[in-house]
C-alpha cells in the first residue's frame, strides 16, 4: 500500500462514505431516506400529530397520520406518472 511521508495510508476508506458515493439502488435508497428524515423531522405535521395525540387516542391519530401519508403518496405518484 502506498504511504505518505507521515506513515499514514495514502487512502483511508470510510465504509459509510463509500456506500453513499457509489451508484445503485441501495445508496440511492439510503440517500433518499436520510434526506426525508432530515427535512421532515421538524415538519409541522409532526407537531400537529403530537398535539393531537395528547388530546385524542394515540391509535386514532396514528391511523389518521398513516392514512394521510398513504393517500398523499398515491396522489403524488399518480401526478408524477401523469406528468
Image (cartoon, helix red, strand yellow):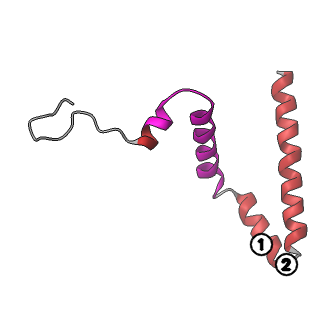
Q: Give me the residue at 81% from left, 73% from top.
A: 53
Left of 28 or right of it: where is 57? right
Residue at the disc numbered 2? 55
Relative depth, front residue between 71 and 13:
13
Residue 40: x and y in percent read 66, 52
Q: Extreme left residue here?
A: 5
In the image, residue 19 above or below residue 48: above
Q: Extreme top residue here?
A: 83
Magenta residues, dominant SS class: helix
Contact between marks 1 and 2 (CB within 8 A): the answer is: yes
Residue bounds of the magenta highlight: 18-41
Residue 28 forms part of the magenta stretch: yes
In the image, residue 51 above or below residue 26: below
Residue at the disc numbered 1? 51
Left of 66 or right of it: where is 31? left
Relative depth, front residue between 11 and 61:
11
Q: Give me the residue at 84% from left, 58% from top.
A: 65
Amino acid at each position: 500500500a502506498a504511504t505518505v511521508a507521515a506513515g499514514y495510508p495514502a487512502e483511508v476508506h470510510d465504509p459509510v462514505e463509500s456506500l453513499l458515493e457509489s451508484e445503485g439502488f441501495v445508496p440511492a435508497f439510503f440517500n433518499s431516506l436520510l434526506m426525508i428524515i432530515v427535512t421532515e423531522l421538524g415538519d409541522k405535521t409532526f407537531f400537529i400529530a403530537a398535539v393531537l395525540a395528547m388530546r385524542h387516542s394515540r391509535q386514532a391519530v396514528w391511523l389518521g397520520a398513516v392514512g394521510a401519508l398513504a393517500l398523499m403518496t398515491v396522489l403524488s405518484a399518480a401526478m408524477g406518472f401523469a406528468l
